[in-house]
Image: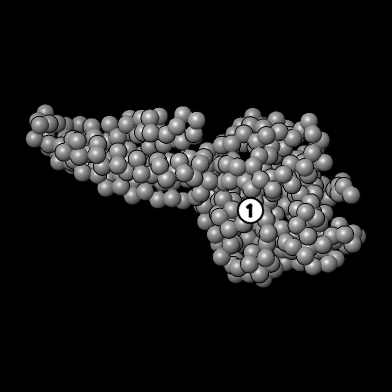
Amino acid sequence: MAVTLTSTLTEELTLFRRTLHQHPELSLEEYETTRRIRAFLDKHGIEQLDYPLETGVLAVVRGKQPGPCVAVRADIDALPIHEETGLPYASQVAGKMHACGHDFHTACALGAAVLAKTVADSDASFVGSILFVFQPAEEAGVGANMVYDTGVFQDFQVGAIIGEHNNPHLEFGKIGVKSGPLMGSVDEFRIVIKGVGGHAAIPHLAVDPILVGANIVAGLQHVVSRAVSPLDSVVVTVGQFNAGTARNVIPPHAVLEGTVRCLQPEVQDLVERRFTEFVHDTAKAYGAKAEVEYERQLPVVVNDEAVASVVWDSAVKVVGADNVVVATPTLGGEDFAQYQQHLPGCFFWVGTGKRYGWHHPSFDVDERMISTTSQLFVEAALEWLRRNA
Ligand code: NI
């Protein structure tokens, strides 16, 4: 049985998304957003769960008979970006914006919860339950672990998790699905190069950390191109290079900070090792010393084959085979990956084809995909439950 949204519900979800859009809240500050989600779920008679989360909401829709449980996850936080869309429902908070479309994601999961409830009330073949996760703090990379640490996944013995991200680079109306790696790992580093300060005109009595740093910045790109297979994907970006106080002074130290992104967990291990060796050895070659802090923030989003096949088949049902495409990966990170450390999952793209990319001040999503995505969430969740009953 195909499930569809009423036009009233679609309109309600669109308005809800616009309200969130006008009132963006940053990671771990999503108090009003949480209140609005709770009110929406209350209005539609959806059971909310009591777990220790400051922000974010957990809800469940139970079928007629007990059985397995599958989770549907949406993130709810905004970004510290000043909106420049000029939309009538643009952000009313200076310097804050839903520039990644998590307002859209929230609306899609709410729509799915309402649809699931409709099916649960009318269809005796709905066995098992669907856990709805409205997750805080995705942008901070900490929300998924906070949700997981509540223990709700163990209590409900959740067998799989499904999530999506709007994708402005994917044509409107398309759904992108693939098994295997979809989004990059996120590692962050800080390098302190310790040289010897001195007079700019007498360099031989100093050890110039700026020159060492410049060679490290350039050389790291060679680590990428010569230590990693050209068939694998890696990005190393030095985003900050700070050194010096005057034109005629060689400073005693320089600080480099940046990020490393990979698409294969084994490449992540290789890059971390070669990165660290290269920085230490380069500094040593110049008579300097380097201190390296290298921290893994997020693992790779790797989709499970069985769950991805459920999402693919459900997408075909919802948007037609012509509109389901093999997802193109990105090296952007997602803390959805943290759930996938514990249970199989599938993260997919929703084509919202607008002009501006994620985190751009003119970013927007095409709201017409809210109902489609809600429907797909429910189809996929029910299909997973059928295959795993
Ligand atoms: Ni996002």
Quadrant of the image for the C terminus? bottom right
Q: On the rendered structure, is 85 left or right of 184?
A: right
Q: On the rendered structure, is 133 left or right of 333?
A: right
- In this rendering, the answer to whether 215 lies above or below 265 is above
Q: On the rendered structure, is 226 left or right of 388?
A: left
- Whether residue 13 is visible to the viewer of this picture, yes or no, is no
Q: Horizontal and vertical percent for residue 48?
A: 72, 66
Image quadrant where residue 365 sits:
top right
Three-letter amino acid code of the residue under disc 1: Pro
Q: Horizontal and vertical percent for residue 197?
A: 15, 40
| Residue drawn where x is 37% and y is 48% of the image | 294
Nearest to the observer: residue 214 or residue 382: 382
Q: Horizontal and vertical percent for residue 260?
A: 43, 41
- Whether residue 376 is visible to the viewer of this picture, yes or no, is yes
| Residue drawn where x is 86% and y is 49% of the image | 3
- In this rendering, the answer to whether 36 lies above or below 150 is above
Q: Horizontal and vertical percent for residue 287?
A: 16, 38
Q: Secondary structure at mark 1?
A: loop
- In this rendering, the answer to whether 204 lies above or below 72 is above
| Residue drawn where x is 33% and y is 30% of the image | 218
* Other residues around mark 1 within 10 Å, as few (<14) / some (14–19) / many (≥20): some
Nearest to the observer: residue 150 or residue 64: 64
Q: Which residue is mark 1?
A: 344
Image quadrant where residue 359 sits:
top right
Image quadrant where residue 195 sits:
top left
| Residue drawn where x is 86% and y is 57% of the image | 119
Nearest to the observer: residue 225 or residue 113: 225
